[in-house]
Image (spheres, rainbow, N blue to C red):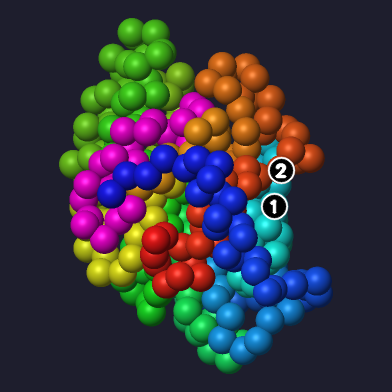
Amino acid sequence: MRVYVGSFFIAICLMLSMQGRAYAALEESVVQLQTANGVLEGTLLVPEAKRGMPVVVMVAGSGPTDRNGNQPGLHHNALLLLSSALAQHGIASLRYDKRGVGRSMSAVPKEEGLRFEQYAADVRDWVKWLAQDKRFGKITVIGHSEGALLGMLASRQAKVANFISIAGPGRPADQLLQMQLASQPAEIQAMALPVIERLKQGKTVGPVNPALQALFRPSVQPYLISWFKYDPAKEIAKLKIPILVVQGTADIQVDEEDAWLLGAANQRATVISIDGMNHIFKKSVPDRAQNWNTYTQPELPVMPELIAVLARFIQQDGKLD
């Protein structure tokens, strides 16, 4: 099912979500998860609510992304703002620094030992950790961008009530990489495409051209192999829980077609298009320069349309009607 969010729908959702509720007090605490490779650290935000409140685990996207959704040079606080907004609807949240980032820096093995599955296992273990806390009821995993695929894998490994993809790719990473390389000079494509094909086959590549070293250095190739083997559409098809796929029309990193691919793969999925929302949940326009400017403006709020849809879905056990 595909839904376009309009102002009337948003107003109704906000009214129903907030009716008779007041979450003035918030409890924020730093929490840690012990793993075989070190400690992961996150932030647990809990609204003043009764026992059995819903809770979400936020899974960040690709790159060195911290618990607030930020990377070096890109400070927008997307996940922090999302967490705070959901708390106003009585929804607790856990967001955490990815392995090897921020306060989870020590929990990263050598680069050649890192695998995509390790990140998925981290999500699974956070879910299991939350399940032991009697304050919480049903757990929802929210995966952003690359984090959507990680969330899909984890949602099959732990007890999760709902799964939400926000700006999640619907195609394997090798295909996305090829699409991104299409804008590069022909000589770069000629060198890179054979490397991608070999990695897709599960085989490493010998010394690569210095121009490709940052992308295909030998130490990162095992990770790319572990990532390339997953097709998000096939993985989401395996889920047997309510699914919400959210995509913004102003996203310059992930195409709307990806949302269609994910939604079509599982009959339990509802696809929501939010007009004017970009990759980091903020109001923008398709123009690349103006769009990228929002990535360094943490004062810009998360779009209320997104909050209304997420709150409704989580509070109504995976339903929007």
Could you tell me residue 305's position as x and y percent?
57, 46
Q: Which mark is residue 251?
A: none
Residue 26 lies in the magenta-colored region: no
Residue sitting farthest toward the left: 201
Q: Nearer the viewer, residue 204 or 156?
A: 156
Report which quarter residue 104 is drawn in. Answer: bottom right
Looking at the image, which residue is at 51% across and 28% down? 250
Lateral position of residue 87 relative to residue 4, left or right:
right
Dot 2 and dot 1 residues touching (CB under 8 Å) = yes
Q: Is residue 286 above or below residue 230?
A: above
Mark 2: amino acid: Pro
Q: Nearer the viewer, residue 184 or 318?
A: 318
Looking at the image, which residue is at 68% across and 58% down? 85
Q: Which mark is residue 301?
A: 2
Residue 265 lies in the magenta-colored region: yes
Mark 1: amino acid: Leu
Looking at the image, which residue is at 22% across and 63% down? 238
Q: Is residue 276 above or below residue 225?
A: above
Mark 1, Cα crowd under 10 Å, few <14 / some 14-19 / many 20+, is many
Task: Magenta stretch: give its range.
Answer: 247-270
Q: Nearer the viewer, residue 319 or 66?
A: 319
Q: Which mark is residue 81?
A: 1
Q: Nearer the viewer, residue 82 or 197?
A: 82
Could you tell me residue 113's position as x and y percent?
43, 57
Local secondary structure at mark 1? helix
Q: Earlier in the sequence, mark 2 or mark 1?
A: 1
Q: Is residue 97 visible?
A: no
Could you tell me residue 29's position as x and y percent?
76, 74
Could you tell me residue 35's position as x and y percent?
54, 76
Report which quarter residue 3 is drawn in. Answer: top left
